[in-house]
Image: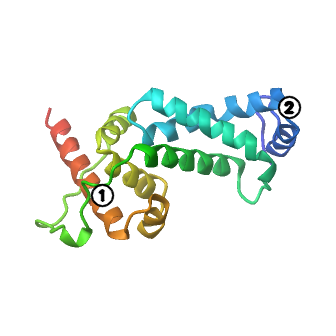
Amino acid sequence: MRLDLEPYMLEDQTLVGRCQNNDRLAQRQLYEQYAGKMFAVCLRYTKNADDAQDVMQDGFVKIFDKINTFRFECPLESWIRTVMVNTALSFLRKSLKWRNSIDIEAVTENGTETDVILSGFEYETLLGFIRELPAGCQTVFNLCAIEGFQHREIAQMLGISEGTSKSQYHRAKQLLQDKLLIERHR
């Protein structure tokens, strides 16, 4: 049983149905209900808040355009998140260059990978470090570590090889690890 804290909030099925009928109040509620979380998703894939806002706005335009295709085969929030991630990836494809990537087989491990404990770091600090990564590393890291996609899936989404996805992820982890170690010793 779902306990609604705000009685004026519409249930997802009612909200989607009203959005499918172009009800502007329902569209506004859907936007306000999910904008904060989706802005955070978009911000993980972009370098600044302005780009994240643009991606989020484009994502919501797509959501309202495609709301008639939503059939509750997954939770509404999951569907919205997928649209936002795909919109962010489209944005990145327009500007992203993979020319500085190397295949994972060319990466040699120097010793064992050092585990860096993330506890003690603020969310905003970690997000800032992720946003400072080179675009390719940032995108692959978000898709793999945060969204949970496999390298095979990431390669298909981005039009790169699976090895490139793995090398970008490896590079991202190494860069983040270095930043966290430096920050920890400040």
Mark 1 surroundings: few (<14), some (14-19) or many (≥20) residues within 10 A? many
Kindly identify the amino acid type of the residue bearing the numbered disc 1: Gln
Res 34 quadrant in image = top right
| Residue 41 in sight here | yes
User: Is 130 left, or right, of 8 in this rendering?
Assistant: left
Q: Position of residue 176 (x, y in %)?
A: 25, 47
Spatial CA distance of label 1 from label 2 is 43 Å
Q: Which is nearer the eye, 155 or 147? A: 155
Query: Residue at the location (70% across, 42% down)?
Result: 63
Q: Position of residue 72 (x, y in %)?
A: 78, 55
Q: Which mark is residue 41?
A: none
Quickly name the residue at label 2: 23
Q: Is residue 166 above or below residue 96?
A: below
Query: Residue at the location (38% across, 35% down)?
Result: 47
Kindly identify the amino acid type of the residue bearing the numbered disc 2: Asp
Q: Which is nearer the eye, 91 or 115? A: 91
Q: Is residue 9 above or below residue 87?
A: above
Quickly name the residue at label 1: 168
